[in-house]
Amino acid sequence: MCCGGIYLDITTNKLIKIFFPIPNILIPVINQNGECFLSQWGQRESDKNLMKDFPVTGWARLESLHKDYWKKYKPVEVTVPFTSFFEKDHNDPLYPKNKATEFKLQSNQALKGILIERDGRKVTYIITKQIENWLHDRYPLIVLNV
């Protein structure tokens, strides 16, 4: 489901590693006009200034976008320019407990997300799709980075 990611901070030219459980964590997003800015990655119960009417999660199921669940939030599609993303491993001998595996993206790939905004606050949810025979039953939607 993508529990973390790595992105290049263009101001310092350093790779930044982040994980979703960190309260109020910011991720870079690129809107449809090509503008890049930071946005909060989803919401957790532990976030300061929790937006009560926004979903408490970091992900948006592709199926729920097709069923208009998100329509009331007026989402805008964005890309998340991670260079890699992380998945929590299963608790079995091949995947030790509380470890995360890094999956590198190609230089022309990014994750797809939706951005919702209210009162100047921007919150991004990474879109996931159903998948079988993988670490989990969900996988982040990977798109070509423009």
Image (spheres, rainbow, N blue to C red):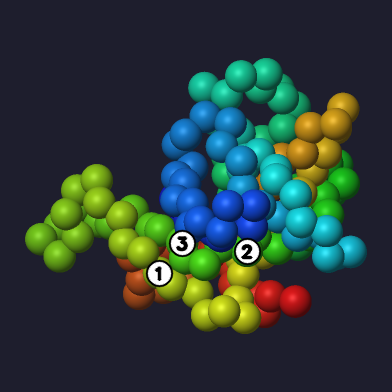
Residue type marked 2: Pro
Q: Residue tagged by mark 1?
A: 103
Quadrant of the drawing holding the C terminus: bottom right
Contact flag, marks 3 and 2 (Cβ < 8 Å):
no
Please, what secondary structure does the residue beneath circle 2 have? loop
Residue occupying the point 40% across, 58% down: 86
Nearer to us of marks 2 and 1 is: 2
Name the residue nearer the viewer: 63 or 56.
56
Q: Residue tagged by mark 2?
A: 81
Vertical side of 57 occupied by 141: above or below: below
Q: Residue tagged by mark 3?
A: 85
Q: Quadrant of residue 45?
A: top right
Residue type marked 3: Phe
- Image coords of residue 10 (percent x, y): 64, 57
Name the residue nearer the viewer: 26 or 59.
26
Q: Earlier in the sequence, mark 1 or mark 3?
A: 3
Horizontal side, residue 113 vs residue 85: left or right: right
Q: Say whether residue 98 is visible.
A: yes
Please, what secondary structure does the residue beneath circle 1 have? strand
Vertical side of 78 occupied by 53: above or below: above
Residue occupying the point 82% across, 50% down: 75
